[in-house]
Image (spheres, rainbow, N blue to C red):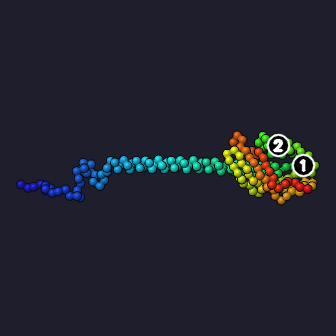
């Protein structure tokens, strides 16, 4: 009687073991259920961390973009105010007052109209006309509802008896009213018409 070819032979380490025979997978590919759960948990945690990081970065980018847009809007209003303030013709001071007034807070409109009446007669007497140019402007200070913008500007003046300095510096204080920047005050660093 012949023995079966594998009888009495111990398992060869290179052969599949009984667990591997059941699954049909090599022993090296068999995984522990705990290891599988740990790897899955680590991957889920990594995904949550990456998603949270992406959301935070996106929010920060939106906040930075909104802050940049707000700063640009404040500078733009200060520049427009300066140009409107510097550009007028004594023959049409009514439209000048409206153009400037459109960029002012309610408080500043009252102040401007009060002082403008005093200047109106002087402007007509010296027959002054001028055209402004903004040379440079930048934010000095800003928060959610107020800003100060420094503006360096030049004014080309035509008049009888008025000498204009070569350039002027202006500090423009702005307030945000219903989401819109408006001029609330301004100060000239160099006086206007002289002589």
Quarter the C terminus occupies: bottom right
In the picture, measured across the screen, residue 178 lies left or right of residue 124, that is left
Of labels 2 and 1, the one closer to you? 2
50 sits to left or right of 167: left
**Residue at image location 78% in from the left, 40% down from the top:** 106
Task: Find residue 59 and name its label.
Answer: none
Q: Relative to 182, does residue 161 appear above or below in the rendering? A: below
Horizontal side of 75 relative to 110 (left or right) equals left
Side of 134 where 15 appears, left or right: left
Residue 160 placement (x, y as % from top left):
93, 54
Residue 150 at x, y percent in the picture: 75, 53
Element at label 1: helix
Q: CA distance from mark 2 to mark 1?
A: 18 Å
Whether residue 102 appears in this view of the structure is: no
Work out which residue is located at the far left of the displayed protein and give it. Answer: 1
User: Which residue is painted at 79% across and 49% down in the image?
Assistant: 186
- For the point 92% across and 55% down, the residue is 161
- Viewport quadrant of the N terminus: bottom left
Q: Which residue is mark 2?
A: 111
Out of 23 and 121, give the one closest to the viewer. Answer: 121
Residue at 42%, 49% in the rendered image:
43
Can residue 44 be seen here? The reply is yes
Name the foreground residue: 132 vs 39. 39
- Dot 2, how many residues are within 10 Å of its Cα: few (below 14), some (14-19), or many (20+)? some
169 or 159, which is in the foreground?
169
Residue 28: quadrant of the picture? bottom left
Element marked by disc 2: helix
The tag on residue 123 is: 1
x, y (%) of residue 100? 80, 45
């Amino acid at each position: 009687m012949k023995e079966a070819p594998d009888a009495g032979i111990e398992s060869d380490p290179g052969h599949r073991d009984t667990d591997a025979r059941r699954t049909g997978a090599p022993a090296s590919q068999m995984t522990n259920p705990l290891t599988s759960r740990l790897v899955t948990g680590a991957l889920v945690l990594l995904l949550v961390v990456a998603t949270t990081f992406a959301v935070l970065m996106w929010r920060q980018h939106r906040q930075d973009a909104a802050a940049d847009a707000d700063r640009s809007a404040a500078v733009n209003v200060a520049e427009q105010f300066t140009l409107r303030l510097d550009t007028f013709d004594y023959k049409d001071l009514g439209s000048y007052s409206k153009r400037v007034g459109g960029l002012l807070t309610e408080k500043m409109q009252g102040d401007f109209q009060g002082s403008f009446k005093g200047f109106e007669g002087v402007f007509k007497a010296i027959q002054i006309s001028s055209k402004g140019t903004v040379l440079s402007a930048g934010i000095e200070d800003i928060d959610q509802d107020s800003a100060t913008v420094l503006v360096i500007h030049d004014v080309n003046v035509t008049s009888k008896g008025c000498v204009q300095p070569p350039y002027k510096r202006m500090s423009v204080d702005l307030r945000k009213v219903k989401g819109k920047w408006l001029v609330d005050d301004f100060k000239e660093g160099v006086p206007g018409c002289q002589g």
